[in-house]
Image (cartoon, rainbow, N blue to C red):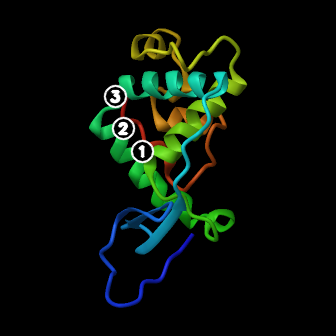
Amino acid sequence: MKTRFRFGMDGMTGTIDGGVYYYNHRLKKHMMREYVVPRPSSANARLKAVMKNLAAIQPSAAYKQNFKDYLMAYNDLKEYREHPVPGWNNLYMKMLFKMQKHLAGIDLATLTRAEIYAQDLPCKTLAAAIQAGLLPEVWNYARFNALI
């Protein structure tokens, strides 16, 4: 949700009154979301394990830069202009979860960089992921060929 501040508090970030306030540099807007502590459940435990494992993969700096460049082109697509994606990692997660859905036998809770290379998975490069249909095509997407 976009926010407006009164009394010159533009630089405020943090958690106040049940909300998390932050500034998104790419969108050039102050944002707010409700601070929610999820109830413990088996689904939350599974998601926690998946996110911890995906953080352990640690994509290369060139791979991240490819996603950042792709993000600008992605947000310029007609169907995504109204609701742009704020960060490269959102697209990265979207790609990985879509890959898990489309390819049988992929478990994001145990996936490693070595498995990505050994099985030649489409997430190895951003261009391969786009060709596999995990993300929409943008102009000149073949240049996004940095390895994970």
Label 3 crowd (10 A; few <14 / some 14-19 / many >=20): few
Is residue 70 positioned above or below 102 on the image?
Answer: below
Taking the spot 55% from the left edge, 66% from the top edge, the residue there is 76
Label 1 crowd (10 A; few <14 / some 14-19 / many >=20): few
Q: Amino acid at mark 3?
A: Gln
Label 2 crowd (10 A; few <14 / some 14-19 / many >=20): some
61 relative to 21 in the view: left or right: left
Residue extending furthest toward the bottom: 7
The Cα–Cα distance between marks 1 and 3, rounded to whole angstroms, is: 21 Å
Looking at marks 3 and 2 on the same chain, the residue that comes earlier in the sequence is marked by 3
Is residue 60 positioned above or below 32 on the image?
Answer: above
Q: Nearer the viewer, mark 1 or mark 3?
A: 3
Where the C terminus falls, by quadrant?
A: top left
Taking the spot 41% from the left edge, 89% from the top edge, the residue there is 6
Q: Provide the residue designation for mark 3.
A: 58
The Cα–Cα distance between marks 1 and 2, rounded to whole angstroms, is: 11 Å
Q: Position of residue 77 (x, y in %)?
A: 61, 64
Q: Amino acid at mark 2?
A: Tyr
Q: Which mark is residue 143?
A: 1
